[in-house]
Image (spheres, grey):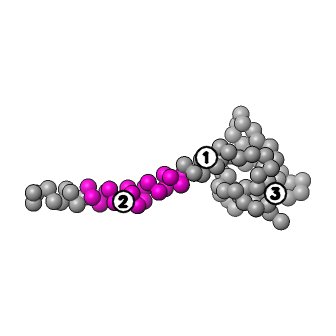
Amino acid sequence: MQQYSGILMIVALFAIMYFFMIRPQQKRQKEIQNFRNSITVGQAVVTAGGIYGVVKQIEENDNTLMIEVANGVRIKVDRNSVYAQAQPAQ
């Protein structure tokens, strides 16, 4: 048993790392992807770059969104750059 204790410690360390670091990150990524897939026109969002706006148009064929960041100012962003739902920018 003494000869296997070192290997068991390493395996236990990797198991702990998986459950406390890797698994929560995978869960968060899945939540973000589900949010990105459920974006609708009129929804307030914030991009990964910190830009707040309201979704005005969804282009399914090239996976982009048209976001209005101010009255009459629209930018085209990749759907994967949208990070979270937000309150509309004032």
Q: Earlier in the sequence, mark 3 or mark 1?
A: 1
Of the 4 image quadrants, the one containing the N terminus is bottom left
In the rendering, at what x and y percent does residue 76 appear? Answer: 77, 47
Give the image location of residue 33, x and y in percent. Answer: 59, 47
Residue 24 part of the magenta segment: yes
- Return the residue found at the far left: 2
The residue identified by callout 3 is 69
One can see residue 51 in this view? no
Residue farthest top in this picture: 61
**Residue 24, image x, y percentages:** 47, 57
Residue that appears at 53% across and 55% down = 28
Please name whichever residue, 67 or 12, is drawn nearer the observer in this view of the structure: 12
Q: Which mark is residue 34?
A: 1
* Extreme-right residue of the structure: 72
Q: Which of marks 3 and 2 is in front?
A: 2
Badge 2: residue crowd in 10 Å (few <14, some 14–19, many ≥20): few
Asked if residue 73 lies left or right of residue 16, the reply is right
Distance CA(mark 3)–CA(mark 1): 23 Å
Helix or strand or loop: what does disc 1 sit on?
helix
Name the residue beneath numbered marker 2: 17
Residue at mark 3 to residue at mark 2: CA–CA distance: 41 Å
Report the magenta residues as a range: 11-29
Q: What residue type is labelled 2?
A: Met
Image quadrant where residue 37 sits: top right
